[in-house]
Amino acid sequence: MKYFAFGSNLLKSRLEKQSKNGEKIGKVVDEGTTTLKNYDLVFNKKSIIDGSGKANIIPKKSSQVLGIIYNLSEKQIWLLDEIEGGYQRSKVYVLYDSNSVEVCTYIAKNGSTEENLVPTKEYMNYIISGAIEHSFPADYIATLKSWKTKN
């Protein structure tokens, strides 16, 4: 199954170490960078652990979100469903090799978002490191680095 990662799971090593009840996602296949058109990256998903902002995508005309397509097994995606609390798995279409490709991603559930949330510095570092790892354009990385964070 093709999974579109746009937040902290951009960093491949972090995604592979994600676990629930001791079971890790494990090795994943990176199929490359992609673009989700008419969506915007925001940090309005409220963390149940510390109340900080977590990455989310919302519809917005003329915007785009860069991400990675990972190929996950059915078992890996079901495990990720459990790990991604407060999110729901959704289908979106991304531009990949000039084609529109259906992928799944995680969008914050109704009631789990809040305005004016700020991500932690550690969390943003995962996203920035993943963007660098996958050679995202310098202006996209600069935008990520410009987000206000809390320690």
Image (cartoon, rainbow, N blue to C red):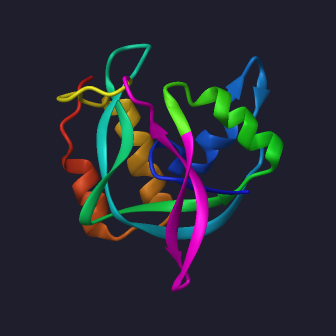
Q: Is residue 89 visible?
A: yes
**Residue farthest to the front?**
110
Residue 113 in the image: above or below residue 134: above
* Foreground pick, 56 / 25: 56
* Foreground pick, 73 / 16: 73
Provide residue 107's location: percent of width, then percent of height: 46, 41
Q: Is residue 115 left or right of residue 120?
A: left
* Foreground pick, 5 / 102: 102
Provide residue 2's location: percent of width, then percent of height: 67, 59
Residue at horizontal 73 percent and vertical 33 percent from the top = 79
Can residue 99 be found in the magenta stretch? yes
Provide residue 38's location: percent of width, then percent of height: 32, 65
Q: Is residue 42 left or right of residue 4?
A: left
Which of the image's four quarters has the N terminus?
Answer: bottom right
Q: Is residue 144 left or right of residue 72?
A: left
Q: Is residue 18 visible?
A: no
Q: Is residue 30 left or right of residue 125?
A: right
Residue 96 in the image: above or below residue 134: below
The secondary structure making up most of the magenta span is strand
Numbered range of the magenta stretch: 89-111
Residue at horizontal 44 percent and vertical 45 percent from the top = 7
Residue at horizontal 60 percent and vertical 66 percent from the top = 102
Which of the image's four quarters has the C terminus?
Answer: top left
Residue at horizontal 34 percent and vertical 71 percent from the top = 137
